[in-house]
Image (cartoon, helix red, strand yellow):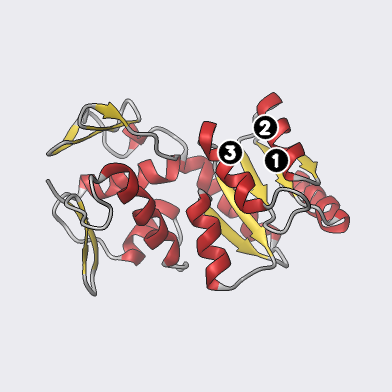
Amino acid sequence: MSAVLLIEDDDRIRLSLAMALEDEGYQTHAVATAEEGLEMQRRQPADAVLVDLMLPGMDGFECIRQLRRTDDVPVIVVSARDDTHDIVAGLEAGADDYVVKPVAVKELAARLRALRRRGRTASATAPGVTTMTFGDLEIRPEAGEVRLHGEPVAVTRTEFRLLCELAEHAGQVLSRQQLLSRVWEYEIGDERLVDVHVGRLRHKIEDSAGKPKHLVTVRGLGYKLQP
């Protein structure tokens, strides 16, 4: 059984979603505010966090940012706000995925299972590979480490999985749909997930995110990782 932290201020939604997740086999802790959620995660870390964006007091965006300062726990935004700006802002804050209300619990459970699989070490996808080097960038799949100029780089589990996937196909262009399938395990999905995660990675592994030399875009085709 996996533990899930649900941060949702609507009492009806919080109760019904928590009960539905329990029925799916998840141990669920549900709170109404970001402040309660952050404290709960510090005291009793969950395996995944579900965050509404419109919360009283601290909003969901800031909640995710604060989580990401110390925790790489998988985060899914669960919100009624479905416009591009809010979705991208939630992902840029550090979320791994998002679902729009009303929530289909079976779909949410499937995404949680995919997140759990992605959280496993990348050694399963790159057996025997200890270090992959791209100039000043080093990726160590078995150790779960990324280094730039010899210094450790903090990445989320999804960012690490994405980086390893690109590294395993170094110099080869992978389309957004290929990356959605291989990293998020979605046969059909929102390509913004890929674009935002690539953008986040560039800020971490490039000397200049605006002029990337490792993680480059091939216009009209997708992305590739190069020395």
Q: Amino acid at mark 3?
A: Leu
Q: Which residue is painted at 31% across and 40% down in the image?
A: 125
Report the side of 114 relative to 141 (left or right).
right
Q: Earlier in the sequence, mark 3 or mark 1?
A: 1
Give yes or no for contact between labels 3 and 2 (Cβ–Cβ under 8 Å): yes
Give yes or no for contact between labels 2 and 1 (Cβ–Cβ under 8 Å): yes
| Residue 80, image quadrant | bottom right
Measure the alpha-carbon separation of dots 3 and 1.
12 Å
Task: Establish if 167 lies above or below 211.
Answer: above
Measure the alpha-carbon separation of dots 3 and 2.
9 Å
x%, y% of residue 62?
61, 48
The residue singled out by tag 2 in the image is 41
Q: Which residue is painted at 66% across and 68% down in the image?
A: 81
Give yes or no for contact between labels 3 and 1 (Cβ–Cβ under 8 Å): no
Residue 187 in sight in this render:
no
The residue singled out by tag 1 in the image is 5
For label 1, count other residues whose C-alpha is less than 10 Å away and answer few (under 14), some (14-19) or many (20+). Answer: many
The residue singled out by tag 3 in the image is 67
Q: Nearer the viewer, mark 3 or mark 1?
A: 3
Q: Earlier in the sequence, mark 3 or mark 2?
A: 2
Q: Secondary structure at mark 3?
A: helix
Q: Amino acid at mark 2?
A: Gln
x%, y% of residue 39?
72, 31
Q: Earlier in the sequence, mark 2 or mark 1?
A: 1
x%, y% of residue 214?
19, 49
